[in-house]
Image (cartoon, rainbow, N blue to C red):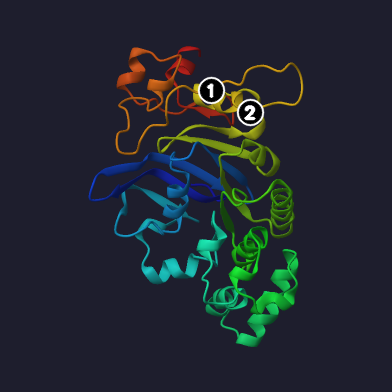
């Protein structure tokens, strides 16, 4: 782990246990985020994106979710081995998260000012009056009048609630901001405003960003690097320019092929056959092989490891290895 590495996830495995089944949500996830880097984590619904984010902050739903293997290191320290007190010091202060649905992540019985202020008072040990001044400044920064700090979540629109979530996320200038599908429930106009706001905040504070989404357009707009996740494993990673410009994994090519274009000749969109691998029944070998047009016998039996195809571009695919 070099001095420029902020967060490193090593061979992470997460399991969900219910009365009906046992699901393997992450199956050896490896991910590295450097200081000041904006990384996109992209994949279909059910690929393990949110589970990866919750694991970083040790916020997996209990008692169903459990880390069964691997490690998560933040600035060289093992998050997976930290005490509750140590984790509380990191959450919100060093690593912060913007959740997918602001209505469910905000407490309806407390005003937005109280909720953001609680975070500030806990870590900075200031008075309620001092915290209120900081909350007003944060709300103004995200485009909300400071006087609305006494309003409750139900008094805000969806876009405004998401802005409140962003204000809470950046309240303590975290080193790493995790954004879990922050624009999913918003209309296109509000999406553009939220993305522009996040771009400005990242520039202002030089915060590292992990943007979790299935929207490739958002990744190309906000991020420098991208990692593609499938069935709880990273199957391709590199700079946005390389991965989107010359995708190496059949799954990545399928995702890009499903995006409609307003330019050039209109052609039928490419659809990836089949359904995403279920966490309750992950296929042996390469998890993508039942849906892959290039599937070989080895793909059904062995898990492909990441191989470098350029300085910053890696892929986990036997077909790519054979092409070397």
Q: Is residue 282 above or below residue 39?
A: above
- The x and y percentages for residue 168 are 60, 67
- Given residues 45 and 15, the one toward you in this image is 45
User: N-terminal of the two: label 2 or label 1?
Assistant: 2
How packed mark 1 is, by other alpha carbons closer than 10 Å (few <14, some 14-19, many 20 or more), is few
Marker disc for residue 208:
none
Which residue is farthest left? 19
Q: SS of the residue at dot 1?
A: loop
- Given residues 134 and 45, the one toward you in this image is 45
- The x and y percentages for residue 78 are 40, 56
Q: CA distance from mark 2 to mark 1?
A: 10 Å
Q: Is residue 186 above or below residue 174?
A: above
- Answer whether labels 2 and 1 touch (C-beta < 8 Å): no
Q: Residue at x 63, y 63 (%)?
A: 161
How packed mark 2 is, by other alpha carbons closer than 10 Å (few <14, some 14-19, many 20 or more), is some
Q: Which residue is mark 1?
A: 271
Q: Residue at x 56, y 43 (%)?
A: 213
Q: Which residue is mark 2?
A: 259
Q: Is residue 246 left or right of residue 296?
A: right
Q: SS of the residue at dot 2?
A: loop
């Amino acid at each position: 782990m070099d001095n420029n590495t902020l967060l490193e996830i090593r061979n992470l495995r997460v399991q969900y246990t219910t009365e009906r089944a046992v699901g393997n949500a992450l199956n050896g996830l490896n991910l590295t985020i450097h200081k000041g880097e904006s990384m996109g984590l992209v994949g279909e619904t059910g690929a393990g994106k949110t589970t990866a984010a919750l694991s970083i902050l040790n916020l997996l739903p209990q008692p169903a979710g459990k880390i069964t293997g691997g490690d998560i290191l933040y600035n060289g320290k093992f998050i997976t081995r930290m005490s509750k007190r140590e984790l509380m010091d990191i959450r919100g202060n060093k690593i912060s998260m913007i959740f997918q649905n602001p209505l469910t992540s905000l407490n309806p019985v407390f005003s937005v000012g109280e909720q953001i202020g609680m975070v500030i008072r806990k870590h900075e040990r200031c008075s309620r009056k001092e915290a209120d001044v900081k909350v007003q400044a944060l709300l103004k920064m995200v485009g909300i009048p400071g006087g609305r700090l006494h309003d409750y979540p139900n008094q805000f629109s969806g876009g405004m609630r998401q802005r409140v979530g962003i204000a809470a996320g950046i309240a303590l200038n975290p080193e790493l901001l995790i954004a879990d599908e922050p624009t999913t429930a918003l209309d296109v106009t509000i999406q553009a405003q939220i993305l522009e706001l996040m771009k400005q905040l990242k520039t202002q504070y030089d915060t590292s960003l992990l943007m979790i989404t299935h929207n490739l357009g958002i990744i190309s707009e906000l991020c420098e690097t991208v990692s593609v996740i499938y069935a709880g494993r990273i199957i391709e990673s590199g700079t946005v320019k390389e991965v989107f410009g010359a995708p190496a994994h059949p799954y990545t090519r399928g995702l890009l092929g499903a995006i409609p274009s307003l330019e050039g000749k209109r052609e039928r969109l490419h659809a990836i056959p089949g359904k995403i691998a279920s966490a309750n029944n992950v296929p042996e070998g390469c998890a993508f092989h039942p849906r892959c047009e290039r599937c070989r016998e080895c793909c059904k039996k062995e898990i492909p490891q990441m191989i470098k195809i350029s300085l910053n571009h890696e892929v986990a695919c036997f077909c790519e290895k054979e092409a070397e």
